[in-house]
Amino acid sequence: MKEGIRKFENSVSVVSLKKGDYEILIDKIEDMKKLSSVECHLVLYPFSREISSKDFVFSPYEEYVNDILAKQRSAYGEITERFGNFFGLILGLLIVLFFALFKPEDLLSIESLVSVIGSYLIGKEIWDDIENIIINLTKKSKIRMVENYYRFQLEKHSTLTLYSVWAKKRRYGRETLIPDKMDFIHHSNSQTLRLFFEKSEIKKIPGSSALIVNITLDEEKVEKFIFDESLLGVKLSLNKKFLFFKRSFELFQSLEGGKKGCLDEKGVWHENSLFQRKTFSFWKIKGFISKRIVENFSLVKTR
């Protein structure tokens, strides 16, 4: 990204199809094909007290998550955290090493076997607590441990996924960008969608633009919903990977009351501006290199 972030201006489009029906598109696809991955997070918060989060749908991801939680077949499956197993395995191996060094005659005894299995199971259980402690202790540090942004991953080799991709093109009449990982968070008054796109998926898009999500209002609430009287927050992360490290340009901008702008880390609103962060990450360890407000920058456009 030697050219900087200016070439990614107007990378996210909000398209109004009709009242109560909106599409969110990712543009500048050709430039994004040079990246390792792209992440796009969206939050929609209507200001009207007559509208709640149950009155609008982030399609198709809300349906995917509802299917998963209902134990129905879906194109996505839950991501299994494996480090707890690894931590339990380390504890088990330490017990084996202890017996091998100090009590070799008991290495193959029932006592040692029970100790190894017990250490493994305990390690799995306590890792979540250890991780939460580290996350809380490093919350305000420049290098911190963070929670996984994504709960669900695409089942790439399922026949269902192939049919889903094919059907989306027919349904929406345009190229659709399929996220490798995603999460959907349903609050009482807002909804948040997090999408992670692999380079391999971005390279499949032949044009310069692709649909990522459709937002649809409940028919009974359409007349009471005004897009300009809502907050649509967008985070776009442009990622480059080197070995096991990821370097990211994180761009934040919102449409609020019909105006573009951003909040800085003190919560001050900057109109017609963008908040940018440079970060690096390795596994769940994230470092914050720099941050700044970029004036006269349009990340989100309406059409």
Image (tube, helix red, strand yellow):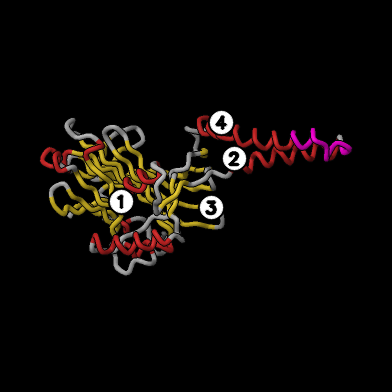
Question: Going from the N terminus, do you reach mark 1 or mark 3 first?
Answer: 1
For label 3, the residue is 245
Image location (x, y in percent) of residue 199: 43, 61
Question: Going from the N terminus, do you reach mark 4 or mark 1 first?
Answer: 1
Q: CA distance from mark 4 to mark 1?
A: 34 Å
Question: Going from the N terminus, do you reach mark 3 or mark 4 first?
Answer: 4
Left/right placement of residue 254 relative to residue 228 reads right
For label 1, the residue is 60
Q: Which is in the foreground here, disc 1 or disc 3?
A: 1
Question: Going from the N terminus, do you reach mark 1 or mark 2 first?
Answer: 1
Q: Give the total of numbered labels.
A: 4
Q: Which is in the foreground here, disc 3 or disc 4?
A: 4
Q: CA distance from mark 2 to mark 3?
A: 21 Å
Which mark identifies residue 84? 2
Q: Amino acid at mark 2?
A: Gly
- Position of the C terminus by quadrant: bottom left
Q: CA distance from mark 1 to mark 3?
A: 31 Å
* Residue under the point 76% across and 37% down: 113
